[in-house]
Image: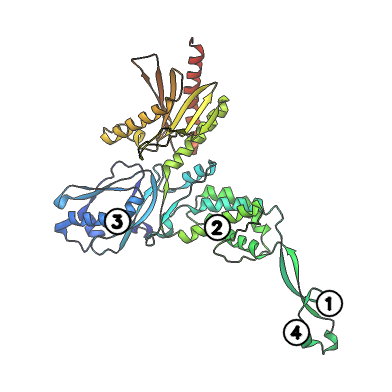
Amino acid sequence: MATKAAQDIFCEIPCLTEQSPSLSGLELQKKWFRGSDKRYLAEALQKFVGYNKELLGFLGVTPIITGHDKDVGLAFRTSQFVGTIPLRAPDTGKQIGDFVVVPRYASQRNRFGDYVQILSLLKHRIEPQFVDSIPLASGRNFRPPLYFEALLYVKELAAFTKRAWRRFRSVEEIQTHPGGRINWERYVEHNHDPRRRLEFPSRRNILSESHPEYQQLKYVYELALAEIVAPVTPSRIKATASATISYLDERLSDMLAVKTRTMQIRLSDPPAVKSIKEAANRILQKDVQRGKAWRVDFSEVFERFVQHIFEQVSKEIGGVLLENVRFRTHGEHLPVWTLSHLEPDAVLRKNGQLFFVDAKYKAHLLNRTSDSEYLKEEHRHDLHQVMAYSSFDTAERKHVFLVYPSSSPSLEAMDFGSPFSRGETKVGMVGVPLDVSYIEAAKRLILQAITADVRYLAATPA
């Protein structure tokens, strides 16, 4: 029997799908569009596309109506975005199932575990984007993995608790002598009793860790903990956090948890306090957004992942990696649409030699046997772009890397020579899987290509 989550899914396909298998119009009418007339299925599909155009565009999904009459169907092209959106039926306008785009490399068992492992390596924070929508029918099953943010918060809180953060709090107590702010109204209620004349109800301020803001951090910790130990969280994520959780459970065991919607950040807060409050607010904000349509731009994830790999390569060869270098445009009275700058993802510099790197999160190396004109045009555009970057190198022999996602690490070399000069450009087309277990294999291929070029240039007479 299908699970409740599966019943709420209209369609689930990977990102970077050139064209998905077509969904039969008759099957769609039978399951989702029951009020639509079977004789006019094409019109129903057109209406469905119109109803959901805005959210499909948000997720970067292009609907493709195929066939005609009773053989009409609906296919989809997906782009670089991963996420989930709710859909409406064409006959009633009411909510039906959700449209889900998963990472290309994902398994059915764990869609986002590899993604979280990659994000934990990167020095750049990549946040999901949300948009107002009706609540997702699939609920928490296909929302962004909050356990990653929870894991970051738990680690930061553990480090924060090792420093002192005390604030004054007001406590009321009975003293045997006048001191602090005495509540005389309460005192006169019992001073007629000789045995209680030396009981002075008073209020005083003491420095303590058990103040409301620390208690709010404890509340956010409980939210984060619930995410980490949830059944949908991968076992390796739970194992990573187990020692930190044990420490925090003991460290905060005597502290009350005070519910809050947001942590107030003050100008007077020390940097460490501001940082932990910001981390707490990210958890609180995502708790509010959990039912909305969302997406993650995997082109940015891939770009940062490629930068991470080339940074490791540059360290091994004693080079320098410059990320997102901007070559600015200068000129007068230029059209509005003129580019303000060119920006390769990275430039690796070694002994005065430059290697330009551009990462493209596109399906080319995942569709090696496809004769698609779309793939050809996109590759031509990518190649022209990376060759344009290399024009800023004054050397006759230029070097560029064009990086695509792939199912396994690969590297193919292409040489472009000029018929008008001795100039040539060597293009390394690199395939990099979005999986941390392939980092070392990808590095070896890139290192071999770079060291071979460095040796060739060193042996070539000027």
Disc 1 or 4, which lies upstream in sequence? 1
Q: Which mark is residue 52?
A: 3
Residue at the far bottom in the pictured view: 192
Q: Quadrant for residue 53, please give it.
A: bottom left
Per the image, the residue denoted by label 2 is 281
CA–CA distance between discs 3 and 4?
A: 67 Å
Give whichever of discs 2 and 4 has the lower sequence position.
4
Earlier along the polypeptide chain: callout 2 or callout 1? 1
Q: Would you call the spot at circle 3 few (<14 residues within 10 Å), some (14-19), or many (20 or more)? A: some
Residue drawn at point x = 67 percent, y = 62 percent? 253
Circle 2: residue type: Asn
- Which SS class for mark 3? loop
Distance from disc 2 to disc 1, alpha carbons, whole Å, reads: 43 Å
Which labelled disc corresponds to residue 185?
4
Q: Amino acid at mark 4?
A: Glu
Q: Is residue 15 above or below residue 141?
A: above
Q: CA distance from mark 1 to mark 3?
A: 72 Å
Describe the element under mark 2 as helix, strand or loop.
Answer: helix
Gap between marks 2 and 4 measured at Cα: 42 Å
Residue 226 image offset from top left, x and y in percent: 54, 59
Task: Give the SS element for disc 1.
Answer: loop
Q: Residue at x 57, y 50 (%)?
A: 152
Q: CA distance from mark 2 to mark 3?
A: 32 Å
What percent of the width, then of the height, locates residue 54? 32, 54
Give the residue at x 22% y 59%: 30
Crowd class of label 2 (few under 14; some 14 to 19; many from 20; radius 10 Å)? many
Label 4's element? helix
On the rendered image, what quadrant is the N terminus found in? bottom left
Report the disc number at residue 178. 1
